[in-house]
Amino acid sequence: MNSIIRFIKNWALPISMLVGVVSYFVYVNIHALDHTHQLMNDIISVVQPGLIFMMLFFAFCKVEPRALRPHGWQLKLIGIQTIAFILLATPIILFPTISGRVIIESAMICMICPTATAASVVATKLHGNTSCVVSYTCVINLVAALLIPAVVSLLHSGANNLDFWTSFTIIIGRVFPLLILPLLLAFGIRYMLPKFHQYLASISNISFYLWTVSLAISIAIATKAIVHSHETAFTYWGIALVSAFACCLQFYLGRVVGRRHGEPIAGAQSLGQKNTAFAIWVAYTFMNPVTALAGGFYAVWHNLVNSWQLYQARIHPISN
């Protein structure tokens, strides 16, 4: 029994991904449950944000407020995301009917997507600087909230196009409850209920297990997006490859930049691990809905990278 528990702990991420895929196919093929599909969507829309909120809350309980100050080297990461996003948008702005536009937009989403809220959890497991990841997560969400509406407003035209302030308000409304509120709550308890805060900090590892549940749900949602898409094989392969390239590139660049400043793990997780639920939502809301597949594929790639990193960390616990 102990060996089984140890195996599950060691391979929690790939197991969660497999559970997400299998659960989706099992559920949709039980036709007696067909009438519950809308109810299940409603439940997930409540459970998933709740899991993310609690996961972040426990993770933030271990973070010192003064350690959240942004670091100068993180500007390089912001520069990578910002410049890549603008460069990719340029040919679409200049040539709106350009061939392969869906694939280019998919690459844009992969590059500008903010850091995953779970990145700090993985950084902790890898013995990286959690505070650096948290501070970057906060900053890049604000950058994305400003940059996405500004650029998307140039990509699309028409009566249904959202203006900058409307888009900005929508994004902030989504980011604030799931990122800022758990941070404020954790810091409030730290100062008002210090003993209770110490207890919460002592069990903060629960955030990793909350993440495994959230990951299974995210992979199930990504599987649904892929299954229900009716694009050509070229589009599927194009989006899959461009998202895989973007994932590997950002993990690599993040590690290179971070290593130069003594934070290889924080750099890699900050730039490479993405909030793919946010990416899927941005695609549906502001771009061609087909580009939501990029978020689904990226969810697979970055969790495979994380699984490999956690495996390496168990073999070489001191290595970064």
Image: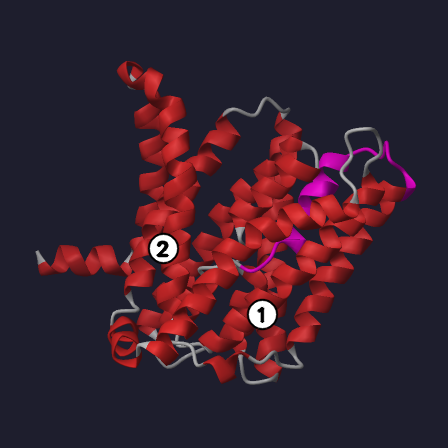
**Residue 82 falls left or right of residue 246:** right
Color encoding of the figure: secondary structure
Residue 184 drawn at (x, y percent): 46, 68
Name the outermost residue toward the right.
94
Chain part drawn in magenta: 94-115
Residue 118 drawn at (x, y percent): 44, 60
* 78 drawn magenta: no
Distance Cα–Cα, label 2 vs label 1: 19 Å
Q: Quadrant of residue 320?
A: bottom left
| Residue of label 2 | 211
Residue nearer the viewer, 290 or 234: 290
Q: Is residue 228 visible?
A: yes
Q: Are marks 2 and 1 in contact (CB under 8 Å)?
A: no
What kind of residue is marked 1? Tyr
Residue nearer the viewer, 300 or 158: 158
Residue drawn where x is 79% and y is 42% of the image: 163
